[in-house]
Image: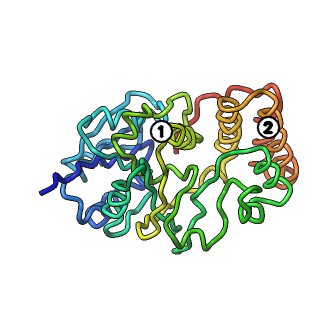
Amino acid sequence: MARQPRVIVAVVTFQSAPHLPDFLAALPAGLAGVASWQLIVADNASTDGTVALARRLAPDAVVVELGANLGYSAGVNAALRAVPSADAVLVLNPDIRLRPRSVALLLAALREPGVGITVPRLIDEHGDTAPSLRRAPSVLRALGEAVLGGRRAGRFELLGEVVRDPDRYEVAGTAAWASGAAMMIARRCFDAVGPWDESFFLYAEETEFALRAADAGFTLRYVPEAVAVHIGGEAHESPELWSLLMANRVRLFSRRHGPWRTAAFRGALVLNEAVRAAGSRTHRAGLRALLPPLAQPPTRSLS
C-alpha cells in the first residue's frame, strides 16, 4: 500500500481574528480524503487576538509566531520549516473557505509528472468564478491592459496578463502563475526551487515563486473541480496596498529583464494608472508609486 502524503496546511495570518472561525470550520470538509495533514498558523505579530483564537479553536495546530510583521513569504517559509518532512504544502489566506474534498483533488493533480504547483478554482461569496489565472508579465500585455482595459485584454493571449476567458476556467490546464491565496506546492518543487522570496513583503511573491518554478521545469496546473471561496480583494480598494502592488510588479519584472524592457513595462503601467487616475484614489496612488525614481515602499501591513 502506498504511503499517504503528509500535507502542511499553512495559513499566514495578520489581524485575522474575524476570518479564522469560518476558515477553520471549512477545513475538515475541504480536507476530506486526505489521510495525514497538519495545520500550521504562521502569524505576523497580530494584535487582535489571532494567536489566542487559533490556539483555542484549533488546539492541534502548530502556531508559529514570527515576532514581527515580516510578510506573506516569511510566513510560508516559516510553516515549511515547522514540518520539514511534509510532502506538500497548501498555502492559504485566512479569508479562504475550502469546499469539500478540494485538497484531495489538488493533491491528486500534484502527482502528475512535471507538476510542481496546483491551484483551485476561486469563487467569490456570490459563487462567481474569480479570474485567478495569470500569464507571464510582458510589455505587450501591460500595454494591452492599459489601452483596452483588463477585461477586454485578458481575453487575448498576447494582450492581457489576467486570464479573462470564462471558458478557460471550466477545464483543467496550466498557467504561468496564479493567485497565491490558495496554492499547493510539492515538496520536490520547494527542494529544487528554494523558499519564497521574503524581499517581496506582500504582492508578487507568488508570481516570483511560480516563475522560478517554471524556470526549474515545474508546471502549475489549474484544477477546476477543486473549489475555494475567496473573500479578498482589498488591494483594489486600498491606495496603500495598490501602490505596493504596482511597485512590486516593476521590481519583479526588472529581475527577469533588462533595463530597457523594464522601462517600457513601467511606462505601460504608468499609462494604465494615468488613464484611470482622475476618478480613483487607488490609481492615483499607483501612479505615484510608478513615477521615477521608483520609491522603495515603506513596510506595509499584511492583510
The amino acid type of the residue labelled 2 equals Arg
Q: Residue at x 66, y 32 (%)?
A: 256
Q: How many tags in the picture?
A: 2
Would you say the residues marked 1 and 2 are in contact, meaning their CB atoms lie under 8 Å apart?
Answer: no
Quadrant (top left, top right, bottom left, bottom right) of the N terminus: bottom left
Instruction: State which mark lies toward you, 1 or 2.
Output: 2
Q: Residue furthest left?
A: 1
Q: Is residue 92 visible?
A: no
The local secondary structure at tag 1 comes to: helix
Left or right: 218 with respect to 51? Answer: right
* Other residues around mark 2 within 10 Å, as few (<14) / some (14–19) / many (≥20): many
Left or right: 17 with respect to 268? Answer: left
Where residue 302 appears, x then y in whole percent?
A: 52, 40
* Other residues around mark 1 within 10 Å, as few (<14) / some (14–19) / many (≥20): many
Q: Quadrant of residue 190?
A: top left
In the rendered structure, find residue 72 and report the number of the disc placed on it: 1
Q: Residue furthest front?
A: 113
Nearest to the observer: residue 96 or residue 141: 141
Q: Residue at x 43, y 58 (%)?
A: 96
Question: Which sits earlier in the primary sequence, circle 1 or circle 2?
Answer: 1
Where residue 121 appears, x then y in whole percent?
A: 49, 65
Q: Which residue is mark 2?
A: 266
The amino acid type of the residue labelled 1 equals Tyr
Nearest to the observer: residue 194 or residue 27: 194
Q: Is residue 282 visible?
A: yes
Nearest to the observer: residue 190 or residue 111: 111
The local secondary structure at tag 2 comes to: helix
